[in-house]
Amino acid sequence: MNLVGNWSYPTAIKFGAGRISELAAACAQAGIKRPLLVTDRGLASMAITQNALDLLDAAGLGRAMFSDVDANPTEVNLAAGLAAYKAGGHDGVVAFGGGSGLDLGKMVAFMSGQTRPLWDYEDIGDWWTRADPAGIAPIVAVPTTAGTGSEVGRASVITNSETHVKKIIFHPKVLPTVVISDPELTVGMPKMITAGTGMDAFAHCLEAYSSPFFHPMSQGIALEGLRLVNTYLPRAYADGTDIEARAQMMAAAAMGAVAFQKGLGAIHALSHPIGAVFNTHHGTTNAVVMPACLQFNKSAIADRLAMAAAYLGIDGGFDGFCARVDELNATLGIPNGLRALGVDEGRVDELTAMALEDPSVGGNPVAMTTENTKALFLAAM
């Protein structure tokens, strides 16, 4: 199968092995002449990142990089990134990496021409209309993991360093102009990151598919995304050089992010505060709480997930689907329960309050209350 394509949904995507070679052309397409490549600390010195800088440099676009980005990026990282962007006289961003690099890169571009504080643009009501669209620089996104799907998203998750609350900042123009999805960039991903990011994609698809909101297009995309992760994540984990599995996972990650326009739910409502307070890996946290959240929602989603199980070739309906999730987690070395992630049970009341403030709550199939959310946290321990 020739896993190469040029897609325009939901933005221009250059998909296929080796397509990082088109990075300079992607910048030209986006109208960027002086890009700032934004990535995380771990990626800064890696060969794939230096190669990207070489490609930009060879095309006369310079080789400027900002990499002071935490695993859960904060407004402090953003302020430093904006300072670097303005000092370098840049006119666009190449957001490069996993969720942290992509999210922060998108926010550097977004805030480069705004005058209000970041939190004024939180994804609440029509707050996004406060932003000046002309002050949003163009973005080229280059994912190096297959999980968040942030490369095709119109928002970023930024952690408030003072309150330890994750906030979603949204604007339609935060959607990157061009995406380069090159599965070769994911070949060197460590097994733990392959597993965590892959289960993040699975969580996006699962929660979108289970959400009670009406969005049949997202529903279909989510279902096929579930199938791709179920089929190809174990292969990518077992053999990181399996380029077909890497490509299918990269597609599934983008599909999950497109699909969750339909809504997220309890998995993310729990995962966001845990990540903000205990600095856990987001996708791994999603995987850890997923089994408990499936049981929590059973009364509302059993029939729907039985249909999904049939499509995925899983026997046993809802219970078979849950058993497959347990099997995936075990195969991928996902920690068993929140205690194994270092979550302190003594802070469950605090986490419960934060979860109920998370925007993902509204998309859960079962209404979340203080009582049942606390019980869910304890069940996930």
Image: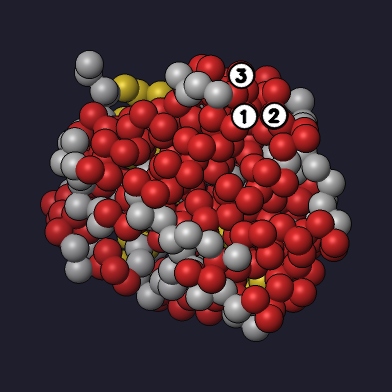
Q: Amino acid at mark 3?
A: Met
Quadrant hosting residue 21: top left
Say if 173 sits above or below 12 in the image: below
Local crowd size for mark 2, using a 10 Å CA cut-off: few (<14), some (14–19), many (≥20): some
Residue 288: x %, y % from top left: 52, 56
For marks 3 and 2 on the same chain, the one whose residue lies earlier in the sequence: 2
Residue displayed at 35% across by 23% down: 6
Q: Residue at 41% x, 42% y: name it.
A: 328
Q: Which mark is residue 33?
A: none
Residue at numbered disc 3: 307
Are the residues at dot 3 and dot 2 in contact (C-beta closer than 8 Å)? no
Describe the element under mark 3 as helix, strand or loop: helix
Q: CA distance from mark 1 to mark 3?
A: 8 Å
| Left or right of 173, for residue 250 | left
- The residue identified by callout 2 is 302
Q: Residue at x 19, y 42 (%)?
A: 239
Viewer-proximal residue, 201 or 4? Answer: 201
Q: Secondary structure at mark 2?
A: helix
| Residue at numbered disc 1 | 318
* Element type at mark 1: helix
